[in-house]
Image: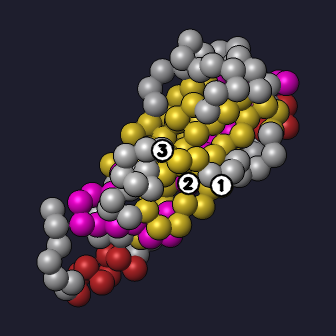
C-alpha cells in the first residue's frame, strides 16, 4: 500500500524500532564450497523504505547451530543489494572467517543501513568447505519504517 501523506501515527511508526525474528537454514545438500550462499532476503513494501536496518545472526544455537555442527569449517557473511533493481551486488565480507569451534557463544551483526523501495537486501554466507550437516541460524532484523518488510529465509 502506497502512502500519500504522513500522519501522526506514521511519524510514530517511522521513528519506532521494530524487530522481526525467525530462523534461516543451511541445507547441506544445497550449499557448495566457497560459493556465496543466500540465507536471508529483505524486501521493503512498495512505498515504504526501511531505515537503520540491522541483522543479527545467532551462530551458537544449541544442537543445530553453526557452532554445534561445525568445527574447522569457517563462515563469513556479506550483504548484497539489487542496486539497479535487478542484479545482486555483494559488499565486502563483514568479518574475518570464523570457525565453528570459535563461534561458540558468538553472533554476527550486519548493518544494512537504508534499504530503498527500488532495491532489496540479501545476506550471503560463504563457507571454507562443505558443511557436514544441515544447520539452523536464528536471526533478528531490526529496522525503522512504515511497514514490515517481506523477509524470506531459506528452509532446509
Q: Are marks 2 and 3 in contact (CB under 8 Å)?
A: no
Q: Position of residue 103 (x, y in %)?
A: 79, 38
Q: Are marks 3 and 1 in contact (CB under 8 Å)?
A: no
Looking at the rendered structure, the secondary structure element under dot 1 is: strand
The crowd level at tag 1 (other Cα within 10 Å; few <14, some 14-19, many 20+) is: some
Mark 3–mark 1 Cα distance, whole angstroms, equals: 20 Å
Mark 2–mark 3 Cα distance, whole angstroms, equals: 18 Å
| Between discs 3 and 1, the one toward the N terminus | 3
Q: Position of residue 1 (x, y in %)?
A: 15, 62
Looking at the rendered structure, the secondary structure element under dot 3 is: loop
Residue at the image position 73 percent from the left and 35 percent from the top: 75
- Image quadrant assignment for residue 124: top right
Q: Nearer the viewer, mark 3 or mark 1?
A: 3
> Is 50 in front, or is 138?
50
Q: Is residue 151 left or right of residue 109?
A: left
The residue where tag 1 is placed is 109
Q: Is residue 141 left or right of residue 100?
A: left
Vertical position of residue 12 compared to residue 101: above or below: below
Taking the magenta stretch, the answer to whether it contains residue 59 is yes
The residue where tag 3 is placed is 88
Q: Is residue 62 left or right of residue 26?
A: right
Vertical position of residue 41 compared to residue 133: above or below: below
The crowd level at tag 3 (other Cα within 10 Å; few <14, some 14-19, many 20+) is: some
The residue where tag 2 is placed is 55
The range drawn in magenta is 43-72
The crowd level at tag 2 (other Cα within 10 Å; few <14, some 14-19, many 20+) is: many
Residue at the image position 23 percent from the left and 87 percent from the top: 8
Residue at the image position 48 percent from the left and 51 percent from the top: 81
Vertical position of residue 54 compared to residue 14: above or below: above
Amino acid at each position: 500500500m502506497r502512502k500519500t501523506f504522513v500522519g501522526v501515527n506514521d511519524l510514530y511508526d517511522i521513528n519506532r524500532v521494530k524487530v522481526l525474528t525467525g530462523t534461516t537454514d543451511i541445507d547441506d545438500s544445497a550449499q557448495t564450497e566457497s560459493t556465496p550462499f543466500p540465507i536471508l532476503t529483505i524486501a521493503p513494501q512498495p512505498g515504504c523504505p526501511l531505515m537503520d536496518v540491522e541483522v543479527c545472526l545467532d551462530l551458537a544455537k544449541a544442537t543445530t547451530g553453526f557452532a554445534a555442527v561445525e568445527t574447522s569449517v569457517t563462515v563469513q557473511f556479506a550483504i548484497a543489494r539489487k542496486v539497479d533493481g535487478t542484479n545482486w551486488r555483494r559488499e565486502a565480507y563483514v568479518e574475518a572467517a570464523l570457525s565453528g569451534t570459535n563461534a561458540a557463544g558468538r553472533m554476527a551483526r550486519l548493518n544494512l543501513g537504508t534499504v530503498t523501495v527500488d532495491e532489496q537486501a540479501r545476506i550471503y554466507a560463504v563457507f571454507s568447505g562443505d558443511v557436514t550437516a544441515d544447520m539452523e541460524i536464528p536471526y533478528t532484523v531490526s529496522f525503522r519504517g512504515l511497514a514490515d518488510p517481506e523477509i524470506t529465509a531459506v528452509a532446509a
